[in-house]
Amino acid sequence: MADTVAVQKLIDSNSRAVFKLNSESDGTGEASVVKVDVSTLLGAVGDGSDRVSIVHIMSDVHCKNKTGHVILEWDGTPNRTILSLGDNKFDWDFQGKGFKLTNDALTPTGDIDLTTHDFKIGDAYTIIVEVRKETAFDA
């Protein structure tokens, strides 16, 4: 079996995009799975130079084992951790605080990956990620 996962693109405008990420685990977990592929966004050049920044994240992570958590990562060689989301609800509006999370991967692809740690059967997450289109978009 495999975890039941879904990625839904809610908004894709000239300047921003919003994604909803869902999963219910069967215990197998996810490891550096691309959740936001920037080459698929409106106006993307698609040559690997497209970059986004994260301006807002809302999450609801449920883990039976309190050590379970989700890690969002900038895809690259190697991947770079954006943040870790534990067993709780979060609403972080970085833009409202006057800053954003920018890609600091050494060899970035621009994509956003997700890894689950210590997820058990029935553990789940819903994450809303809002990104701002920064570099190399035509739109």
Image (tube, grey):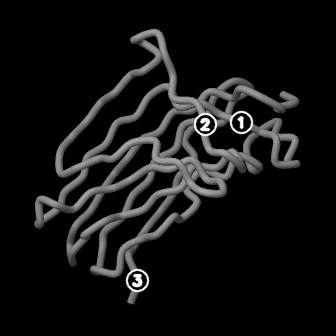
2 or 1: tag closer to the N-terminus: 1
Residue at label 2?
Answer: 103
Q: Position of residue 127 (x, y in %)?
A: 38, 46
Q: Nearer the viewer, mark 2 or mark 1?
A: 2
Amino acid on which disc 2 is placed: Asn
* Marks 2 and 3 in Cβ contact (< 8 Å): no
Q: Residue at x 25, y 70 (%)?
A: 119
Res 120 quadrant in image: bottom left
Mark 3 closeness class: few <14, some 14–19, many ≥20 residues within 10 Å: few
- Judging depth in this view, the residue of 57 and 113 nearest the camera is 113
Q: Identify the residue position indicated by label 3 in the image.
A: 2
Name the residue: 29% across, 80% down. 26
Give me the residue at 31% from left, 42% from top: 59
Q: Would you call the spot at circle 2 few (<14 residues within 10 Å), some (14-19), or many (20 or more)? A: many
Q: Amino acid at mark 3?
A: Ala
Instruction: In this rendered view, identify the residue nearer to me: 95 or 104.
Output: 104
Q: Which residue is mark 1?
A: 51
Spatial separation of the CA atoms under disc 2 and disc 3: 29 Å
User: Disc 3 vs disc 1: which is toward the camera?
Assistant: 1
Which of the marked residues, 3 or 1, is nearer the chain's N terminus?
Answer: 3
Question: Mark 1 belongs to which amino acid?
Answer: Arg
The image's mark for residue 59 is none
Q: Is residue 70 left or right of residue 42?
A: left
Q: Are marks 2 and 1 in contact (CB under 8 Å)?
A: yes
